[in-house]
Amino acid sequence: MAEVNGNPVAPDFSRRRAPPMGSEASAAEVEQLLRSQIPFQSDGELVLPPRDGGGVGLVLVDVSNGFCTVGAGNLAPAAPNKQIEKMVGEAARLARLFCERSWPIFAFLDCHFPDKPEPPFPPHCIIGSGEENFVPALEWLENEPNVVIKRKHCIDGYISSIEKDGSSIFSDWVGKHQIKTILVLGICTDICVLDFASSALAARNIGRVPPLQDVVVYSEGCATYNLPVEVAMDVKGAVAHPQDLMHHIGLYMAKGRGAKVVDRVVLEPS
Ligand SMILES: [Zn+2]
């Protein structure tokens, strides 16, 4: 830390020069360096036994228009985005696999009342806007009997599930289906997915969600938004959020809280 008259002072980032345009290569190098300092080991693949799914429940986090459909709102991608498209594809694949076998699915959908902002985020997923609904590839889930849909009004789906009397629709779902493992997919890896996974793990540790044992985050089934530093520095008040790095950090943080992070989910051949 810098010193003035022998006293430590925080570095003044406001005076730091922004990197010149065309410096993508060095930004990539910095990202690589940051990643190399916080590596984590994948837990490999999750294999679903064909007969009963092995007590796995699928949890989908905010696979909605407001976060995934191009141009659908303030927090939706402005242009097609490969990481988000892959996440939606994997969510649809696994949702279909679970529904065909009547295995349990719990889906969170972020939604807000027009007069109740959610700082620091701009208005998003306002009730009635259409942003708060499933992406087209998952709309069919609304009519599936094995799917519980929880419209949540805050970032952390676990907290949103707790009613004023202390009951929890999520804990009830885990208990009813005797779920030992939750497989978590959705958006954003480092925000709603991370907060939900962390809270579920904390609750598991104090026996609030029996018989839950494992929280498994599927890396290829998660995504986050992209706000590159070179764009953010031209937008007043914006905070940079480089997609690949923040996705990595979200998985790293989840792993640090005790989640398993897998990069493949397969059905065991029968
Ligand atoms: Zn929200």
Image: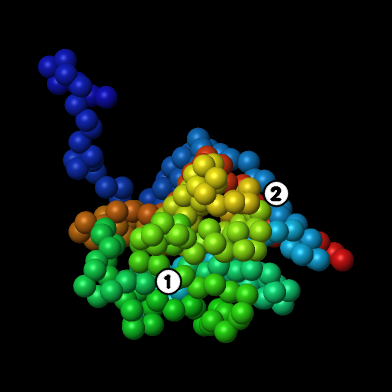
Residue 26 left/right relative to 185:
left
Looking at the image, residue 116 lies above or below residue 190: below
Q: Is residue 194 visible?
A: no
- Where does the C terminus fall, quadrant-wise? bottom right
Label 1 vs 2, first from the N-terminus: 2
Identify the residue under disc 2.
44
Colour scheme:
rainbow
| Residue 169 place in picture, x, y as percent | 49, 64
Comparing 243 with 197, the one in front is 197
Q: How dense is the environment of label 1, judged by Cα within 10 Å: few (below 14), some, or many (20 and up)?
A: some
Image point (74%, 58%), residue name? 54
Seen as rendered, the residue at the extreme right is 270
Q: How dense is the environment of label 2, judged by Cα within 10 Å: few (below 14), some, or many (20 and up)?
A: few
- Where does the N terminus fall, quadrant-wise? top left
Seen as rendered, the residue at the extreme left is 5
Which mark is on residue 191? none
Q: Are marks 1 and 2 in contact (CB under 8 Å)?
A: no
| Residue 55 place in picture, x, y as percent | 70, 59
Amino acid found under the numbered disc labelled 2: Gly
SS of the residue under disc 1: strand
The picture quadrant where one finds residue 145 is bottom right
Q: Nearer the viewer, mark 1 or mark 2?
A: 1
Label 1 to label 2: alpha-carbon separation: 31 Å
Identify the residue under disc 1.
151
Amino acid found under the numbered disc labelled 1: Arg
